[in-house]
Amino acid sequence: MSFPIHRPRRLRNKQSIRNMVRETHLTPEDFIYPMFVTFGKGVRKKISSMPGCYQQSVDEVVKEAQRVYKLGIPAVLLFGIPKHKDERASEAYSSKGIVQKAVKALKDKVPELVIITDVCLCEYTNHGHCGVVKNGKILNDPSLELLAKEALSHARAGADIVAPSDMMDGRVAVIRDVLDGHGFDEVPIMSYAAKYASAFYSPFRDAAESTPQFGDRRSYQMDPSNRREAFKEVALDIEEGADIVMVKPAMCYLDIVSDIKDSFDVPVAAYNVSGEYSMVKAAAQRGWIDEKRVVMELLTSIKRAGADLIVTYFALDAVKEL
């Protein structure tokens, strides 16, 4: 039967009723807050293309992480900006590397906070690519050894979860094997399983100082036109030992988030990336949108699509609105 028996507006009349029948609920536990760690002390450097975000030294990261935890956000995702870069990304897997130092400091000062570390080479190489380069070509298999060394160094420092974001074939299996072989069999892997070669990453490259010095990353990151390929990438990562799989970016790839959630029985993360963040910030600064409402609508849509975890630079702002 239809109108006038059925009146959907009955359940929209009051805020209290709307709250009662709401299908999708955001909580602080849904969020992972990304942070950029750099060398020095007392450093809190604004990222011009990402208003409200900073490159921070370890001491400042600890202070902000304490605020993050008090707000009820359970986890941070660390990216490192090293002092020195080279062809072999040596600071990525150094026991004295910037991320390794940050992990140790955070586990000492905020032990209950879940520390997730980005495992990639692009921030640490002088060419800005996510793998070993030879004669202008990004080599897959030689890169795996370095990625595994990086993941192991993070686990040794105390990381709770390692998150390979490089998109090299087979890296989850190699990392799982190395972690298990060194007694870190209980450290989960959150793989960037369906990571697209997106134009939405530009502000991040400014933040992480990881812009490729030649070419682009389309030979290893996924073609934005492809949907079915995401199933293959996710299935391979799960087979290799991934405990959590991620779709990146989130906003323009909600169909992929939904597909993966419906098809695989593992937690699904989605990365609300820098370009998505900066677009909202820029429009809000010009008075074109209501930032608070847009942020909450955006994050709700990501969870509604199926994301169990949302990596977002909006985490601190969003929690205040919940």
Image (cartoon, rainbow, N blue to C red):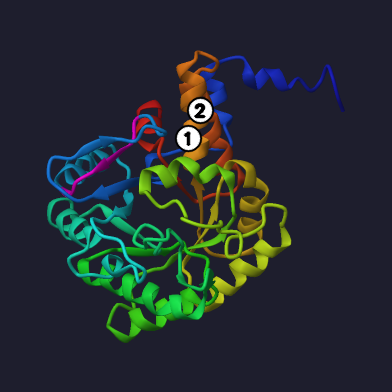
Highlighted range, magenta: 52-58
Who's the residue at 29% across and 55% down the image?
114
Q: Quadrant of the N terminus?
A: top right
| Residue appearing at x 41%, y 60% in the figure | 122
Where is residue 11 shown, x and y percent of the image? 64, 22
152 or 221: which is nearer to us?
A: 221
Tell me if mark 1 has few (under 14), some (14-19) or many (20+) residues whose alpha carbon lies within 10 angstroms of its own: some
Residue farthest along the front direction in this orientation: 135
Q: Is residue 287 above or below residue 226?
A: above
Residue 130 falls left or right of residue 229:
left
Kind of residue at badge 1: Tyr
Q: Nearer the viewer, residue 256 or 112?
A: 256
Q: Is residue 102 left or right of residue 123?
A: left
Q: On residue 277, which mark appears? A: 1
Determine which of the numbered discs, if any, sits on residue 280 in the image.
Answer: 2
* Location of residue 175 (image quadrant): bottom left
